[in-house]
């Protein structure tokens, strides 16, 4: 895909437990960057709201019903395969336990230790630590 192509909107959810742990998933085989860790989510479909897309992706990938979400930050990144505009939400309320419906690994993490992370997601980890633990930049 050309780097000038219109960015693709992607809805991404950070499920946060009361103790600050967050859920990450590993990209399954067959997708670009397979094996890399990411926050769950996926592309927004035409005519779909971003939060609605997030709810759909969590249902499809993890069997979770996301009940609320606060828009947190946006990140644009140009990959060789796509120019993406990521919309990160923080959610503290959901229903259900994560299940690996697409065969992917997932993990709850305090200080995020899984690697490798998708390049556009790397800066988020430090911002998240600042949000959760008030660490200086
Ligand atoms: N879910 C998610 N996607 C991310 C993150 N960071 C990041 O760069 N992305 C990028 O956003 C895009 C998400 O697309 P995807 O391929 O996972 O979406 P999808 O599940 O709708 O895929 P599909 O086209 O196979 O149905 C990918 O280009 C991925 O590299 C992240 O933390 N979470």
Image (spheres, rainbow, N blue to C red):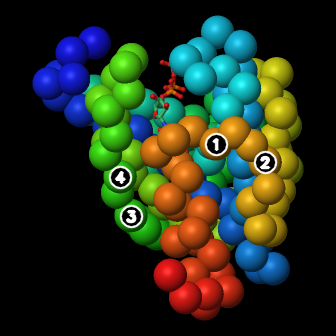
Q: Residue 10 carries which label?
A: none
Indicate the position of residue 110 as horizontal and vertical percent values.
80, 68
91 is higher (above) or lower (below) than 27: below
Looking at the image, which is closer to me, 40 or 130? 130
* Residue at the image point whose x is 62% and y is 47% from the top: 39
Disc 1: which residue = 117
- Where in the figure is residue 9, as x and y percent of width and height? 32, 37
- Mark in the foreground, 3 or 2: 2
Q: Are marks 3 and 4 in contact (CB under 8 Å)?
A: yes
Image spot of residue 59 (x, y percent):
65, 37
| Element carrying mark 1 | loop
Check disc 3 and report its element: helix, strand or loop: strand
Q: Name the residue under label 3.
A: 73
Asked if the beta carbon under badge 1 is closer than 8 A to the nearest atom of ligand 1, the reply is yes
Q: Name the residue under label 4.
A: 75
Image location (x, y in percent) of residue 31: 59, 15
Specify few, some or many for label 2: CA neighbours under 10 Å numbering under 14, 14-19, or 20 or more.
Answer: some
Specify which label sits upstream in the sequence, 3 or 1. Answer: 3
CA separation in Å, label 3 and label 1: 18 Å
* Badge 1 or badge 4: first in the primary sequence: 4
Q: Name the residue under label 2.
A: 114
Q: Is mark 4 within 8 Å of ligand 1?
A: yes
Badge 4: few (under 14), some or many (20 or more) residues near its Cα, within 10 Å?
A: some
């Amino acid at each position: 895909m050309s780097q000038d192509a219109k960015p693709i909107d992607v809805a991404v959810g950070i499920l946060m437990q009361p103790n600050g742990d967050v859920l990450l998933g590993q990209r399954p085989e067959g997708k670009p960057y397979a094996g890399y860790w990411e926050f769950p989510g996926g592309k927004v479909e035409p005519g779909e709201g971003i939060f609605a897309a997030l709810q759909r992706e969590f249902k499809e990938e993890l069997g979770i019903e996301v009940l609320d979400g606060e828009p947190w930050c946006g990140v644009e990144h140009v990959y060789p395969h796509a120019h993406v505009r990521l919309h990160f939400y923080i959610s503290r309320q959901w229903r259900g336990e994560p299940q690996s419906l697409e065969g992917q690994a997932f993990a709850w993490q305090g200080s995020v230790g899984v690697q490798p992370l998708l390049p556009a997601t790397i800066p988020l980890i430090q911002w998240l630590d600042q949000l959760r633990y008030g660490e200086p930049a």
